[in-house]
Image (cartoon, grey):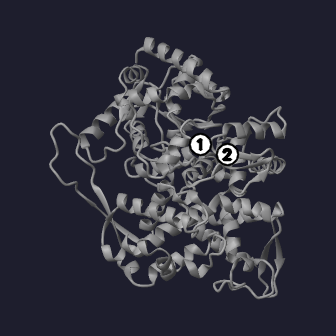
Amino acid sequence: MNYKAVRKFGWLLRKVCRNMYDQIHVDETGLTQIRDLLADRRGSVVLVPTHRSYVDFLLMSYVFFAYNIPVPYVAAGEDFLHMGTLTKLLRESGAYFIRRSFSDDPLYTAVFRAYTQYLVSRGHTIEFFIEGSRSRSGKQLHPKFGILSTVVDCYLSEKVKNLYIVPVTIDYEKPLEVLLHQSELLGEGKIRESITALFKAMPVVRKKFGSISVKFGVPLDVKQYVDATLARAGKQEVSAPTSAIVEDLGYAITDALIENATCAMSHVVATILLVYRQGISKPELVRQAGRLRLEILRRGGRVVGTQGRSPTDVVDRALELLHELVIMRRKDLVEPAVTSREQYPNMIGLGYYRNKLLHWFNREGVLACAYHALDAFNSHSGKASWVSSTLGEAGVDRQELLDGASFLHKMLTMEFVRKDDPVADSVHLAKALEHLESRKVFISTAAASSSVRVEAVDSVMLSLLGTLVWPFIDSYWVAVTSLFALRPHGEVTTEDLLKRLQWLAETMYHEKLISFYESCSRETLQNALALLEGWSVLASRRRAPTGKKSASKVSKPAVQLLSLTPEYAIDGELEQLAMRVSRFRKLPPGVHPATTSETEVLARLPALSRM
């Protein structure tokens, strides 16, 4: 590391940050803990921030530089390798560039592990992103264990006496790349980082992006995690439970990142606007935003940027930050900026902000969706055929509600980050239902059949909760429905299938078969395919790339091929799964449950059979 370059880099970042951001709120108490750890030399320090923007690792270096703490070495993506002088400056300031994936290259893996462990063993602070890549959707991503395993192995092999892993949650009032992310989520190619792209992006530094919050979590003691895992395993050898140690630690880091998260009123206002897509009056928006803010606070969340400002002022500020995504047709009517098909992607942009709230409301959201599905008045026939409720009784059966919510929670496991634990999930869902009852969103009543029934009394809150989750359900239904066309064609590459899924989702939205344009998101559709593989609906195999490898080029990665498993290639099985998922959807006006069957979908979309 070249400290002259670090000072030059710090000066440059100071200029840029002061121009783009109103404030950077730094958790100075957490930073003091890191300073003390480094001073005491009790072990090496590893920083693990959230990853929402390219600004993340630049910001971390700037914060450490500004507080006179040694700047960390950063495991950065190789995207920045082709930026000339800037690449040189980044490298001299502590960045080292790595491929996105290198598990198929033993030599590269060995060199990476050796260099990373050398830095850690010498007492240098290092930084990496456990999510692997930027979250394009605004949600927390599941942890990737590769670099974490390398770091933990440094302790297990006794190269360091201890490790302290510090989760760092970075939250943006207005993320820099939202408009780029919404394009990428619709399948448009990622813009390659280069000097040319950098110069084209220079006008961005003259825009305002609100504030940033940097929160440092409690340092996680790796020695304690190793001891605890060994105690649970009942073994003395260290090598056997390494994967369990890394997995436990990975989810502990992720939990800490989520626990320390904040949101801004821009996230709150975007969420309200996606509930009222046809527009909402300004006074009602202020009222609804204030209520949602209080609901976040009741769940232990923090909403920044509201202190000392009136409710109207904080909403006005949020609308100013969201100006590319919203319009005001009249003085007091606010709505998403969607006046033509070309502006549909703005709903994905607003969805990015809304998804910031998911970790506070996801369990209540699946309960709301399950309630809507079970409730008799939401069925075209007046009573859904799969509901066992007694006619004439209000509300839904409590156990059926929990069972439906449990199915949704399992189906959306890729969307809601948590370690797989069915028992804990059941307990958390029951507690979420109790919370909704305590808030008078639901009330419980005794039924004639001696069972307990649940009835909704706050339809506004229930609709808001459902709107958080319904777009994901539509995506998963689209994924299952697309497989109707897969049976005659055998195998298909994952990339080709994803392109078909996005075409199908957009077509279904235009044909008014699905309600939410956000359901076209590539990330969610990709998660749906991963889930269907995990559920043994799809089988996958890897095919070696064709063609000879050039001596000067890196070998191409293997291609993943997907096909239906024999069980779901049988007539009826796939349609049954599609119908089960469809039961929990929010159907567009005029669309009846029968319209979502395989026969009806193929009739409405004949091109589906030729996909």
Quarter of the image with the C terminus is: bottom left
Q: Earlier in the sequence, mark 2 or mark 1?
A: 1
Q: Amino acid at mark 2?
A: Val
- In the picture, the disc for residue 490 is none
Between label 2 and label 1, give the one nearer the viewer: 2
| Element assignment for label 2 | strand
Q: Which residue sits at x=31%, y=47%?
A: 103
The local crowd at label 2, few if under 14, some if 14 to 19, many if 20 or more residues have their Cα within 10 Å, is many
- In the picture, the disc for residue 326 is 2
Residue 199 horizontal side relative to residue 331, left or right = left
Q: Position of residue 278 (x, y in %)?
A: 71, 57
Marks 2 and 1, how far apart in space? 30 Å
Numbered label tally = 2
Q: Amino acid at mark 1?
A: Leu
Quarter of the image with the N terminus is: top left
Q: Which residue sits at x=32%, y=33%?
A: 114
Q: Position of residue 442 (x, y in %)?
A: 80, 68
Residue 37 horizontal side relative to residue 301, left or right = left
Residue 513 horizontal side relative to residue 373, left or right = left
Q: Is residue 291 above or below residue 598?
A: above
Is residue 378 or residue 258 the one in the foreground?
Answer: 378
Residue extending furthest toward the top: 4
